[in-house]
Amino acid sequence: MPLRPSPPIDACHTDLYVSAATFLTEYGLHPDPAAYLTHGYVDLCLSAWPTASAAELDLATRWALWTWIVDDVFDAELLSESRQVVGEFALSLLLVAGGSTRPGHGDHPAVHALAGLAADTRATMPAHWWQRYLAHLESWVHAASAKLLDFVQPQRTPTLRQYLTIRPVDGGMLLAAMWCELAERCVTPDWNDALVQSLLRSFSTVGCLINDLAAGNADSFTAAGALCASQRLPPAQAQKQVRDVLDAEERRFWWLYMAVRDDELHTTTHHFARALDHFRHALANWTRVSSRYTTAPAPVGEPTDASAEMNGKFL
């Protein structure tokens, strides 16, 4: 049976854009969905998951949008709220995600959207995957709350140790790794394998550092901010050190990616590793140009596309 041709990229973009705008509008997640989408989220998702089918791509994109929206709630909307209000918002997310309760009339729009996302995901993904995702989602909510209450609100810059305790979870990159599994239908049976865990940690570090460098000096909860606080470095020198660390971590990711490719792991895990590489590459390109970042990112170099380092071969 001949393979069906993929839809034209313009048609895919239009369909996903309409779905994203509908999602934002339906739940009242943003007062101006069109303006919000000018940040390029749809382009990022299409670039990150080039072989995803329509339904999975749509669901993964809605998860990504929801996560960015909630990240903005923690970073801006709750900035001057009390510890009690922040705690109540976080608790409502945890209870609804876990299925312990349904959203109430007065709950935040993000809570209502989460209930719909959770229901759609439970109907689509294996139960063990959802339990893993739920555990990481809960950790992300706790980390985002801790960052807001303990550092952002009191205007405290973290030490390097504090940064490294919170940022890998608050960065949400392990959630993004699971969006890759969802979008590309590549739920790995080897998630807890030591080599795959090393790849995931490197993937997370790369994503967090890319984001930190894009934030520049406007955000103190960054790797450069932590270096300034712990090592008393001038901001420019701290930024340079972070760029050096990112360059080294990009090379480490490629090294681990090659190891996963050569290892006798499940073919689905090979597909998963390739999906991580696509997302990493798409994220770097998007972050460089997206209007989500108000300051021009410092040049971090073009990331190595691990899949292109293998003489055009796919896993």
Image (tube, rainbow, N blue to C red):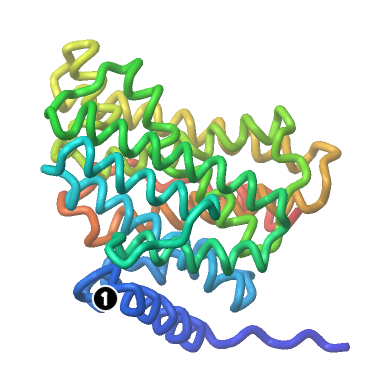
Q: Quadrant of the N terminus?
A: bottom right
Q: Amino acid at mark 1?
A: Pro
Relative placement, left or right, of 108 versus 267 is left
- Residue 311, relative to residue 248: is it above or below? below
Q: Determine crowd level at label 1: few under 14, some 14-19, many 20+ residues with C-alpha closer than 10 A.
A: some
Quarter of the image holding residue 298? top left
Quarter of the image holding residue 157? top left
Q: Kindly identify the residue that appears in the image at 58 percent across and 69 percent down.
A: 120
- Would you name the residue on which mark 1 appears? 33
Q: Kindly identify the residue that appears in the image at 83 percent across and 46 percent down.
A: 266
Q: Nearer the viewer, residue 168 or 115?
A: 115
Q: Position of residue 199 (x, y in %)?
A: 61, 35
Q: Kindly identify the residue that appears in the image at 68 percent across and 58 percent down.
A: 312
Determine the secondary structure under disc 1: helix
Q: Position of residue 212 (x, y in %)?
A: 29, 38
Q: Position of residue 41 (x, y in %)?
A: 37, 66
